[in-house]
């Protein structure tokens, strides 16, 4: 079993918040495909990264789904779609092997 996490920025690169409909669509798509989802959006996490000596940050919402089989090709395509929708160079999608207790 894997826990897949998606970190989505709350605003674009100019600081304008993304519309709630973008986040609702992701929630619905993943819940319909995987039968459930956990979203951490009310207390956003802060992502920091350095690029060429400059430090940047995003407030992010975290979306999580549990999957039995990790379909890497599907997730790569989905990530690319999220990058286009959210106008990002990269959206972080990560998977962690987990054991259901």
Image (tube, rainbow, N blue to C red):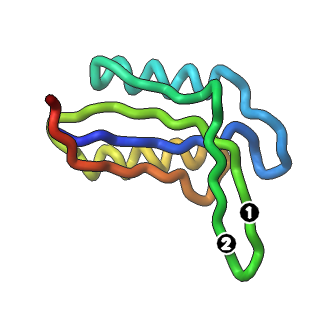
Q: Residue at x 33, y 19 (%)?
A: 36
Residue 50's disc number: 2
Residue 33's disc number: none
| Sequence-first disc among 1 and 2 | 2
Query: At numbered mark 2, what does the secondary structure look like: helix, strand or loop?
Result: strand
Query: At numbered mark 1, what does the secondary structure look like: helix, strand or loop?
Result: strand
Q: How many marks?
A: 2
Q: Vertically, is 5 above or below 22?
A: below
Which residue is most to the front?
A: 101
Q: Do the numbered discs 1 and 2 sit on residues whose CB atoms are within 8 Å?
A: yes
The span from disc 1 to disc 2 (Cα, nearest Å) is: 6 Å
How packed is label 1: few (under 14 Cα within 10 Å), some, or many (20 or more)?
Answer: few
Q: Position of residue 57 (x, y in %)?
A: 72, 56
Residue denoted by label 1: 56
Query: In terms of image quadrants, where is residue 49?
Result: bottom right
Q: Position of residue 68 (x, y in %)?
A: 16, 35
Specify whether 99 is left or right of 87: left
Instruction: Name the foreground residue: 35 vs 86.
Output: 35
Q: Residue at x 23, y 34 (%)?
A: 67
Q: Position of residue 50 (x, y in %)?
A: 67, 72
Q: Vertically, is 61 above or below 7?
A: above
How packed is label 2: few (under 14 Cα within 10 Å), some, or many (20 or more)?
Answer: few
Q: Position of residue 37 (x, y in %)?
A: 38, 23
Q: Residue at x 38, y 51 (%)?
A: 94
Q: Vertically, is 66 above or below 76?
A: above
Which residue is most to the bottom?
A: 52
Specify whether 87 is left or right of 6: right
Query: In terms of image quadrants, where is residue 1?
Result: top left
Q: Vertically, is 65 above or below 88?
A: above
Specify whether 37 is left or right of 19: left
Specify whether 1 is left or right of 18: left
């Amino acid at each position: 079993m894997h826990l897949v996490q998606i970190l989505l920025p709350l605003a674009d690169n100019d600081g304008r918040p993304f519309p709630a409909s973008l986040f609702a669509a992701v929630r619905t798509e993943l819940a319909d495909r995987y039968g459930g989802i956990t979203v951490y959006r009310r207390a956003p996490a802060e992502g920091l990264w350095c690029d060429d000596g400059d430090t940047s940050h995003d407030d992010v919402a975290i979306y999580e789904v549990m999957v039995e089989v990790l379909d890497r090709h599907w997730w790569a395509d989905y990530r690319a779609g999220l990058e286009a929708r959210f106008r990002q160079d990269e959206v972080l999608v990560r998977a962690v092997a987990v054991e259901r207790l």
